[in-house]
Image (tube, rainbow, N blue to C red):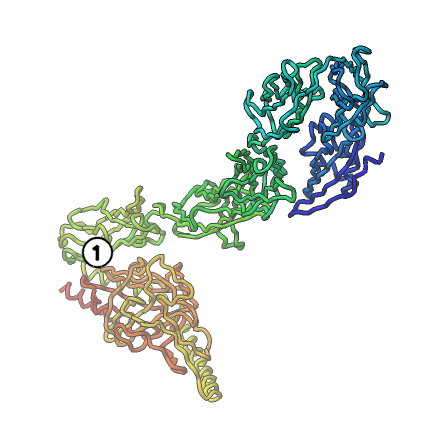
């Protein structure tokens, strides 16, 4: 049908992110339910296949759902019975406004459906019959109003004409009053009551429909006697303004009519016209005698803004004479209706990274009042990141974002939308819209502190938890789910290979037990990663400090016997005085602090009155002079313990033998002589061969050096010494010996047990001259060097004696001098052969001896190129014989000596022969 097509135009508008269009359709009333109004999707150019997914629907203005849309094909159809008269009463144009929404993207379309009138009602009269009394002397041309018929239809379908039945005295006259047609009966010929008292007429009302419909009313004319004056109204029409909601009983207006007749013919009565609407009669009343019109019901401007009343005035004559007038009551609007807010939510959640202008909801505001009372101002709650944007259509708004959202600051908003009209007093309506801010992964995990410090006691249980890290993420759900892992460097030295972290709770466990003596501190990093997409992460540095535990017992350095037990024998002369040093027990503890602070105590002793042990130094001294009655051998059991919470200890046994002074020296010489006689014969030949080879080698080297010096005009030398070198015992320690008028000094780095030389550091280091031409590495000393029990103790000799010549022990070129135990300060000198102690970190192939002039505190002398005296080298295999003696004051005894090489062996043989001769002479003297 042609009425299903859109009329004339389609209006398309764009506003921000919204797309809007307006269509207009027309249908007749009384159309069947299910009839198609129009194809909205086609007229709007929408894809039919996407209507369902885009939620194609009518959202408001459906007028009790008279119309619906089919989301499958986009057709607009009639959903309920359509009665134009019920919808629009007698309004000329009857429009039904619909609002259709599709999403993704959001589109709002406005559809207007005009309901055209159909001739579905027949005219009707409110009265079944009408009796009109007319005086017989009524002149021709007199007019009498007849009851009017009503037809709810409009236009051509309303009442178009009246027809009066055929008669001889009357004709019909139609007057148009506004939209109404009022029939009047006009007297054509004067009546004669004597001829006919009653005249019966039929009045027919017909509409203009096809086919035409009609209604009839019987009109009876009664002829009366003469009453020749009719009432006359003061005005032809009355106009009055009445405020809506006027209380019942309020007098609206008073009409007044006068009659020039006297008596009953001049008394006037008032009544409403016969064609009045029943609704008007319900709202207003007319005083029959006074002509006052009063309010009888609720006056509502929104229902009707004007009322038209026909008032008829009649006298009491016989017959009565009547006249009529029109009273128009204009209703003045009162601000009695609050605005209505309709919210169509697009979404109840919005991501916190939503862009500026994102549409949240559509808001429609209506106020049924008119004028300023119906003008509405809309506003939002202050200090919210949202705003209202007005649409092209009045009182239509979009709720959009205007600022950046942050869920971590505010997670939800309750937005109050206030609509206020401009009436006096103004009325307002508030509606709250709840909006949840959806979390976005925009926060990294955060640690409370960075870096963190962990103090871990050594010997921790392997696999046990040692620490816990915790990071907090301000986001929600997966965006706040934090997992942990270690930053691993790779390689064998990566300490993190011994650690493990629980990815869920950050518990860190050690896969090994740490030893303070091996590792004192280290650091690692833990990375915290959230579960967002993409994930965000941060790291924290954990500094681990290993705390010492008393887990190392004291170690006895001296005395130590050949089988490794802490036992030793000390021979002292009987003539020692009270307070003389017998020996010193040396021990160390790998722990630190109180755990490494050692105390010495004497547990067992043969005679408590003879010996005393220093609690802190471990020195054993005599308490008194020895007598002939004292036993010759005393055994002392010394307990060495640390100061840990649970003390650890070790014991050492020192056996002290008392000997006569001369026997002590003789015993020492006999031992040395016995040790050397056996080797003497075997070594002489070997030494001669080595000497000849060395001389030949030196001759060849000298020739090569002379040739090199001739080829090179200048030779650059660099010497690397420590700044501020000090040889007073701080940088290095020295052992000085004296033999006759010769003095010798053995110089080495002064370092305590357990100290470490850091690569790259020059601490405690003697550096050799950097020679451009080298003649090869010197051969190492023979590995059969031996040292006395005093030297094996590893103690520090701090004596300093003037010397004419000194022997210096240095590392090879570019090699750091290593630590090795220094000589003990034992009271009793012991003779023996000395070699670098095994296990002391000394590379036997990197050491050589040289001696030359030097004094106390003087640095070692460096030879210039070519100045390599033969005596600067030790012939491999030659023994070095050391004899040490100190008195109580720490000064060297003149009997201390050191000899090297064949020259010293010859001196030693001479001394042995002399000693033997002295013993023989002594024996003879004793015999005598």
Dot 1 falls on a residue whose secondary structure is: strand
Q: Is residue 496 left or right of residue 661?
A: right
In the image, is residue 781 above or below residue 122?
below
In the image, is residue 593 above or below residue 836?
above
The reply to whether residue 555 is in sight is no
Residue 796 in the image, given as x and y percentages of width and height: 28, 61
Q: Is residue 292 left or right of residue 695?
A: right
Residue 380 in the image, given as x and y percentages of width and height: 53, 40
Q: Nearer the viewer, residue 833 or 798?
A: 798
Residue 344 in the image, given as x and y percentages of width and height: 63, 36
Where is residue 191, by image quadrant?
top right
Residue 160 in the image, given as x and y percentages of width and height: 80, 27
Give the class, few, some or many, for how many residues have Cα within 10 Å of label 1's Cα (few <14, many ≥20): many
Where is residue 67, by image quadrant?
top right
Q: Nearer the viewer, residue 504 or 675?
A: 504
| Residue sitting at x 26%, y 53% | 585
Query: Is the N terminus in the top left, top right, bottom left or bottom right quadrant?
Result: top right
Q: Is residue 795 left or right of residue 112?
A: left
In the image, is residue 6 above or below residue 256?
below
| Residue sitting at x 27%, y 62% | 830
Query: Is the C terminus in the top left, top right, bottom left or bottom right quadrant?
Result: bottom left
Q: Nearer the viewer, residue 19 or 235?
A: 235
| Residue sitting at x 17%, y 66% | 924
| Residue sitting at x 76%, y 15% | 136
Q: Which residue is mark 1?
A: 582
The reply to whether residue 495 is in sight is yes
Where is residue 791, by image quadrant?
bottom left
**Total marks in image:** 1
Q: Is residue 206 left or right of residue 291?
A: right
């Amino acid at each position: 049908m042609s009425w299903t097509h859109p009329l004339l135009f389609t209006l398309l508008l764009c506003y921000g992110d919204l797309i809007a269009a307006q269509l207009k359709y027309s249908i007749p009333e009384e159309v069947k339910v299910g009839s198609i109004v129009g194809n909205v999707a086609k007229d709007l150019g929408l894809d039919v296949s996407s209507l369902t997914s885009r939620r194609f629907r009518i959202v408001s203005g459906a007028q009790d759902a008279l119309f619906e849309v089919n989301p499958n094909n986009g057709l607009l159809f009639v959903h309920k019975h359509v009665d134009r008269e019920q919808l629009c009463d007698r309004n000329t144009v009857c429009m039904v406004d619909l609002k259709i929404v599709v999403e993704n993207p959001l589109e709002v379309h406005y559809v207007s459906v005009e309901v055209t009138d159909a001739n579905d009602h027949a005219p009707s009269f409110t009265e079944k019959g009408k009796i009109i009394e007319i005086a017989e002397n009524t002149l021709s041309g007199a007019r009498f109003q007849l009851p009017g018929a009503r037809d709810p239809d409009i236009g051509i379908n309303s009442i178009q004409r009246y027809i009066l039945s055929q008669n001889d005295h009357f004709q019909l006259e139609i007057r148009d009053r506004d939209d109404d047609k009022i029939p009047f009966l006009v007297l054509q010929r004067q009546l004669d009551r004597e001829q006919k008292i009653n005249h019966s007429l039929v009045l027919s009302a017909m509409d203009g429909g096809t086919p035409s419909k009609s209604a009839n009313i019987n009109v009876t004319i009664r002829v009366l006697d003469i009453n020749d004056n009719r009432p006359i109204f003061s005005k032809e029409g009355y106009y009055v303004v009445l405020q809506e909601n006027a209380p019942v009983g309020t007098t609206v207006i008073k009409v007044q009519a006068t009659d020039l007749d006297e008596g009953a013919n001049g008394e006037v009565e008032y009544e409403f016209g016969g064609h009045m609407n029943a609704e008007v009669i319900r709202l207003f009343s007319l005083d029959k005698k006074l002509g006052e019109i009063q309010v009888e019901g609720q006056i509502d401007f929104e229902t009707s803004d004007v009322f038209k009343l026909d008032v008829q005035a009649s006298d009491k004559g016989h017959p009565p004479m009547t006249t009529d007038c029109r009273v128009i009551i204009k209703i003045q609007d009162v601000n009695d209706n609050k605005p209505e807010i309709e919210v169509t939510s697009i979404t109840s959640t919005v991501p916190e990274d939503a862009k500026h202008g994102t549409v949240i909801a559509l808001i429609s505001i209506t106020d049924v009042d008119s004028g300023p009372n119906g003008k509405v101002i809309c506003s939002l709650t202050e200090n919210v990141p949202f705003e209202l944007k007005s649409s092209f259509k009045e009182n239509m708004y979009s709720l959009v974002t205007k600022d950046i959202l942050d869920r971590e600051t505010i997670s939800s908003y309750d937005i109050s939308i206030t609509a206020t009209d401009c009436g006096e007093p103004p009325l307002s309506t508030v509606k709250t819209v709840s909006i949840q801010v959806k979390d976005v992964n925009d926060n990294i995990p955060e640690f409370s502190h960075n870096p963190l410090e962990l103090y871990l006691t050594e010997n921790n249980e392997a696999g046990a938890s040692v620490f816990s890290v915790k990071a907090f993420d301000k986001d929600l759900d997966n965006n706040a789910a934090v997992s942990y892992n270690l930053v691993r460097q790779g390689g064998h030295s990566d300490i993190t290979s011994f650690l493990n972290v629980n990815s869920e709770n950050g518990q860190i466990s050690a896969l090994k037990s740490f030893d303070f003596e091996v590792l004192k501190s280290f650091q690692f990093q833990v990375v915290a990663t959230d579960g967002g997409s993409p994930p965000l992460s941060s790291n924290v540095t954990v500094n681990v400090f290993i705390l010492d535990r008393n887990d190392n017992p004291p170690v006895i350095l001296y005395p130590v016997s050949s089988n490794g037990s802490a036992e030793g024998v000390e021979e002292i002369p009987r003539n020692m005085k009270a307070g003389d040093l017998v020996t010193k027990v040396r021990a160390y503890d790998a722990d630190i602090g109180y755990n490494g602070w050692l105390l010495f105590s004497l547990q067992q002793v043969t005679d408590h009155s003879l010996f005393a042990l220093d609690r802190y130094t471990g020195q054993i001294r005599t308490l008194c002079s020895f007598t002939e009655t004292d036993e010759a051998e005393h055994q002392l059991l010394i307990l060495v313990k640390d100061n840990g919470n649970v003390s650890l200890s070790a014991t050492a046994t020192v056996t002290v033998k008392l000997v006569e002074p001369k026997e002590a020296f003789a015993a020492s010489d006999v031992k040395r002589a016995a040790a050397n006689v056996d080797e003497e014969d075997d070594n002489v030949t070997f030494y001669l061969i080595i000497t000849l080879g060395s001389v030949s080698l030196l001759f060849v080297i000298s020739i090569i050096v002379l040739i090199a010096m001739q080829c090179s005009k200048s030779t650059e030398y660099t010497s690397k010494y420590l700044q501020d070198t000090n040889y007073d015992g701080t940088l290095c320690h020295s052992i000085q010996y004296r033999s006759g008028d010769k003095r010798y000094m053995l110089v080495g780095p002064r370092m305590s047990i357990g100290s470490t030389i850091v690569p790259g550091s020059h601490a405690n280091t003697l550096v050799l001259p950097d020679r451009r031409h080298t003649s090869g590495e010197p051969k190492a000393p023979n590995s059969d060097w031996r040292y006395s029990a005093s030297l094996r103790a590893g103690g520090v000799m701090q004596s300093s004696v003037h010397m004419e010549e000194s022997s210096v022990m240095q590392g090879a070129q570019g090699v750091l001098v290593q630590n090795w135990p220094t000589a003990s300060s034992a009271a009793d000198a012991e003779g023996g052969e000395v070699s670098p102690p095994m296990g002391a970190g000394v590379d036997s192939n990197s050491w050589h001896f040289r001696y030359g002039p030097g004094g106390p505190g003087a640095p070692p002398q460096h030879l210039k190129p070519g100045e390599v005296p033969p005596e600067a080298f030790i012939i491999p295999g030659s023994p070095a014989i050391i004899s040490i003696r100190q008195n109580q004051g720490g000064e060297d005894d003149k009997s201390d000596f050191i000899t090297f090489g064949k020259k010293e062996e010859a001196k030693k043989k001479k001394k042995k022969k002399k000693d033997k001769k002295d013993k023989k002479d002594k024996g003879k003297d004793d015999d005598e």
